[in-house]
Image (tube, rainbow, N blue to C red):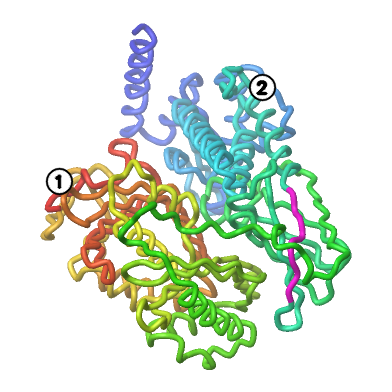
Amino acid sequence: MKDFIRFAFASLLLVSLLCPLKGQSPEQIVRQVETNRSEFYYGHGYADDYDQAVQKAKAQLLQDISAYVKVDLFGSVSTESGVSMEERIRTYTNMTQLRDVTTVAVTTEPDNFHVFCYLTRTAVQRMFEERKQKMLNYFEEGRRAENKLKLTDALQSYYWASLILRTLPDDNQIQFTDADGQQQNLQKWLNSRIRHIVDEVKFEVADVTVEDDWNVVDVKVTYEGKPVANCDYKYWTGLSYSPITRAKNGRGVAEFKEVPKSINFFVEYAFETEAQNLDAELRDIVQGTDKPAYKNTHTAALPTLPFSAVPQSAVLQEPELPCATGSVYYSEMSSARRDSCMDVMKQVQSAVRSKNTASVQFLFTDEGFAMFDQMMKNGNAILTRTPQLSFVQTQDDIICRSLPMSFKFPRSGKTILENVTFRLDNKTLKIKSLSFGLGQDAQNDIMDTAKKWDDRSRAALVRFLEDYQTAYSLKRADFLESIFSDDALIIVGTKLKAAPNIDNCIRLNDKDLYQYTRSTKEQYIRALRRVFASAEFVNLQLKDNEIVKSAGQEIYGIQVRQLYASNSYADQGYLFLIVDLRNADNPVIHVRTWQPDKDPNFGLFDMSKFSGL
């Protein structure tokens, strides 16, 4: 209580100091700020140009903060990270909180400008605290990702947490409690953990196939003996490094004109391009400080036996879509029917290898072929290995999982691996549609037996999410337009303020809770078409899904963490959808919201925020 009283008194004192400044002359403001040294940082700038004077004043302000921050806020500061205090302070120049800097023009005579800038010490301390919280959020995200063998996500979060931590004045004093209840120095732990992950990733050649006169090497990627959920890497081609490639479900790929005797792989851990696109604060840190480097070269020897003789046991099997034992929705396939489906897929594989999509058009419905043709035009599409296909027969269709494919985009130097799922009509065996497979975590969440949903509902959810993310990758604006209801509520961004009235069948429960940017369906689809027209590629990843079913009907609230990337833009945030799956073949989205972060006041959009369901 005493601490609170002291804080409240200090806050009132600061307000009393600030308020009088507004009605004073520039000279009086300078004098009052300089005489209250314990409450303000400040800087003077002199130049014959106003903008130059402002920049000089801000530069001196940063020097002032740097000189006093050690003693005033954190005492003696270790510099073990190798980042000087001046470098650390400079990384705050573009932070939102620096809008609190007040700029006063003291002298405005031609060719003789004097500018004074000042900032409260409370604002500076808040900058450090908010950055520290961001660092801790990345750290926790990294731990969750590592537990799920999502090494791309883990390394990205750990490395970014490490970079942010190095800019905090008390970086070497921050500790956390590990799983054994022991206190650990966070900076040392992060350095050790990144090094451990990079060292323990293993690459092993499993197969080599020939596609378009190129040798495509199928690679097993494991971590501590288990197949990785994902892992970004590059490899030495003999002349240069390859583009960044992502291993998924324990599988990666490397391509060569002539296969070497061994391949050197390098695990990606820095994600500097993503940092610059996703987060302005990270961009400043990446550009403004020296960064740690971690050695990581992994050599995988090619087998001496003929490639065709590589044992199939060496190739990781694609996890099948789980289905309940004794289900009425799933049924056994006869061997003859399975052989017929396999024949269809063998012809599809031949068309992929030859790039002759027209040769198999008769195997598809019109919509199915349009998707297949678009997929083959989506980058340099090739098979990455001999598929190990599995078939599941349902009351609605036959699900074939999956063709392992890579899509190379030369303009952006990006290679994307996807496992392509095909859906065949039960009667005609024509391919109705295709999609890029959902991540195993998302599938497992939907198939969780604790959720009392029937198998048709589970299959419909998997299909919807796969179709949704695939529509972005294949730039299917028409499909997305078809699944949004005409009066869909589309919201971007949230803040506590009054919102305009909403006249929808599904409504926000508290209309005074949100201020947001609301788009109509037409505006949203028009913007998507512009994005699709200009982007070389679009890649959408859906993670950490939480799904709630509306009572008594096939309407679902789907909350996921969405990672969006294209050749020119990237972001991540939280997507929430309210989807009507009463007709699984024709899903309808009634609500779509997106927010970059959890709101400190209400968290994330979910079903509880809406009525009329």
Does 427 sit above or below residue 360?
Answer: above
Taking depth in this image into account, of 79 and 255 the one nearest to the observer is 255
Disc 2, SS: loop
Q: Nearer the viewer, residue 279 or 270?
A: 270
Direction from residue 329 to residue 567 in the image, left or right: right
**Secondary structure under the numbered disc 1 in the rendered image:** loop
Residue 77 disc label: 2
- Give the side of residue 324 with respect to residue 419, left or right: left
Alpha carbons under labels 1 and 2: distance apart: 49 Å
Q: Residue at x 36, y 72 (%)?
A: 397
Question: Where residue 124 sits in the image (x, y, percent)?
Answer: 49, 30
First reached walking from the N terminus: tag 1 or tag 2: 2
10 Å neighbourhood of mark 1: few (<14), some, or many (≥20)?
A: few
Report the side of 613 relative to 6 (left or right).
Answer: left
What number of labels is visible? 2
> Could you tell me which residue is drawn at 45 percent across and 71 percent down?
334
In the image, residue 247 lies at what x, y percent? 64, 58
* Residues tagged 1 and 2 counted as in contact (Cβ below 8 A): no
Answer with the quarter of the image where residue 580 lies.
bottom left
Q: Dot 2, crowdedness within 10 Å: few (<14), some or many (≥20)?
A: some
Q: Quadrant of residue 214?
A: bottom right
Quadrant for the N terminus in the image: top left
Query: Which residue lies under the disc numbered 1?
Result: 509
Amino acid type, residue under disc 1 in the picture: Asn
Segment tinted magenta in the rendering = 202-209
In the foreground, 429 or 336: 336
Tell me the amino acid under the disc marked 2.
Val
Residue 303 lies, in percent from the top left, at 84, 62
